Image (tube, rainbow, N blue to C red):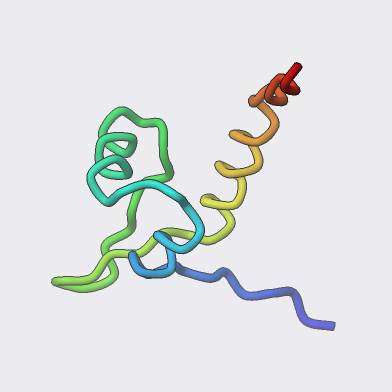
Amino acid sequence: MEPALPRMLTFKELLRLVPYSRQHILRLEKQGKFPKRVRIGPRRVGWWLSEVLDWLHARAADTTPAMAPR
């Protein structure tokens, strides 16, 4: 079985995975709190799927469960 090839996400695909606005993603990137985009053409950028999934898993691991209503 061949290993899976690395996958690059477009901005539209990224927005389906990450429930943030474009502006918030840009802010997080500038602060170093989100995976860096990769320039793949003069007017095209992408994100490595593996880096985004790692970021999402780390965020999920850092959250505490919401308190149950009384």
- What residue lies at 55% left-to-right and 42% top-to-bottom? 55
Quarter occupied by the C terminus: top right
x, y percent for residue 56? 58, 44
Quarter occupied by the N terminus: bottom right
- What residue lies at 28% left-to-right and 65% top-to-bottom? 45
User: Which residue occupies the extreme front position in the image?
Assistant: 70
User: Which residue occupies the extreme top position in the image?
Assistant: 70
Where 55 falls versus 39 (above or below)? above
x, y percent for residue 27? 26, 35
- What residue lies at 30% left-to-right and 28% top-to-bottom? 31
Q: Quadrant of residue 11?
A: bottom left
Where 68 falls versus 36 (above or below)? above
User: Which residue occupies the extreme right position in the image?
Assistant: 1
Left/right of residue 54 with respect to residue 45 in the rendered view: right
x, y percent for residue 29? 32, 39
User: Which residue occupies the extreme left position in the image?
Assistant: 42
Q: Quadrant of residue 34?
A: top left
x, y percent for residue 2? 77, 81
Left/right of residue 65 with respect to residue 6 in the rendered view: right
Left/right of residue 56 with respect to residue 68 in the rendered view: left
- What residue lies at 65% left-to-right and 36% top-to-bottom? 60
Q: Quadrant of residue 47?
A: bottom left
Where 22 falls versus 12 (above or below)? above
Work out whether residue 9 or residue 19 is closer to the camera in this orientation and state it. Answer: 19
